[in-house]
Image: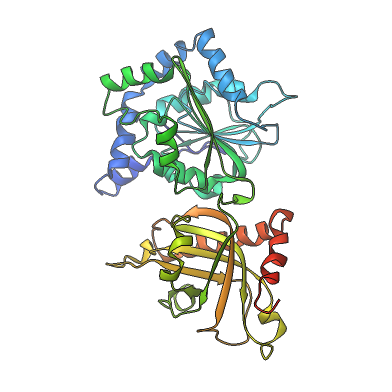
Amino acid sequence: MSGSSRGGRGRGLSPAAAAAEGQQQPTPQQQQAAQQAEYFDEKEAQVLQASITPEVDAKLARVAAGIPGLSAASRVLDVGAGTGALIPHLQASPGARGVQDILAVDVAPAMLAQLERRFPAPSTLGNEPGVRTWLGDIVDLPGYQGPFDAAVFNAVFGNLRDQHLALTKACFLLRPGSYVMISHPLGRPWHESFRAKNPRLVPNQLPQREALEALVRDLPLRVLSVTDEPEFFMALLQVPEGYAHPAAPIRLAGSVTHGYGRGSKRLGVPTANLPPAPLREQLEALPDGVYFGWAQLDVDSSWPEADRQVQKMVMNIGRRPTFGDEEPELSVEAHIMHRYSQDFYGQPLRLLVLGFIRPEVKFGGLQELLARINTDIGIARSQLDTQQWAGYKEQLAAEAPGQ
């Protein structure tokens, strides 16, 4: 597992090196990356490349073939790409798959150097399809590198210090309907044997199905299949089409109450807050995170007609970790994409929750949070314009009191 920035193949500092230059104490995540980079040196890169026997190569082809729907137009994120063993299989069979745009991420410079010799940059422009590289940990991969149609963790998932964090980052980088592949061509017994000899290098197991389900229970990911053979491991997950939440549609209703005032005053994104206590049963099906759907105020005919109509909304359920409250309380905050003619505190509001965009995470500051909120709003707006979700607008309207 390792990485570099290529698109012009400019190479930046790894997170560990950046921390050292700034004389900051490396985080445990950076320390783990540094250990990986030290172990997977030039000699190990050559050993790894030589270990790709015809039998192993056939298994790598099986991994690539197990990712549905790939084509020449697909973009693939290869996490822990190493020397690029999987890349020829993603590029194979132009008529059937022929992936042309691959971002190879790894924390070991020696691994990526070997990969870059095998797969030269398509040009110095940086925006042409080809194999590009990025040196670093996936959790630090900039959002502008996405979106991707698939993310592959091949022979690297056990090396990750925080598997949940890595999958969370992948969700931020993937399109709805895209896939995550976790694989190991040598299988669980070999992986556990190697892990026993190198516990610091390989801190985690390859998850069995139950453990994998638990790992992604608060992420917009569904486990589609797990193949756990003695000499081959492969697990396929998917970001649902349209970010559909498995329990959707979920109905939430209550009278709008005052919140913390941060949405409108500090971020410029006003929200309507619903008291969470009466919604306890519905909220049990919703992990903390960002959702979208439809909203309608139940107000009388003295209000303008537009204020009474069903509107798009994006909603956060959680405890606002970016603000660092000492004893954060659960909140339900909906940003309704309509400018109302007057305040509506105390008015009854109904929400129809359809999609789950991402889990709630702590951002580096308010500007980073605001940038992501605007992204969430854009995602919600575009998803609600699709045929998949448009029909639910009429459904919520038909459920209005007096209809």
Residue 5: % across, % down:
49, 39
Q: Nearer the viewer, residue 319 or 265?
A: 319
Relative side of 102 to 44, left or right: right
Query: Where does residue 403 sit, x and y in percent of width and height?
Result: 71, 76
Q: Residue furthest front?
A: 402
Residue 107 visible? The answer is yes
Instruction: Kindly indicate the quadrant of the structure image that contains residue 266.
Output: bottom left
Taking the image as shown, residue 323 lies to the left or right of residue 278, namely left
Say if 212 sits above or below 288 in the image.
above
Q: Quadrant of the N terminus?
A: top left
Task: Report the residue at 31% width, 68% height from top.
Answer: 325
Q: Is residue 343 above or below residue 369?
A: below
Colour scheme employed for the rendering of this structure: rainbow
Question: Residue 22 location in percent, x, y?
Answer: 29, 49
Q: Quadrant of the rendered structure where residue 310 is?
A: bottom right
32 over 250 or under it: above or below: above
Q: Is residue 108 visible?
A: no
Q: How many marks?
A: 0
Specify the farthest residue to the top.
54
- The answer to whether 328 appears left or right of 109 in the picture is left
State the image coordinates of residue 130 (x, y, percent, origin top left). 63, 32
Which residue is found at the position 35% from the left and 68% from the top? 329
- Residue 323, above or below 360: below
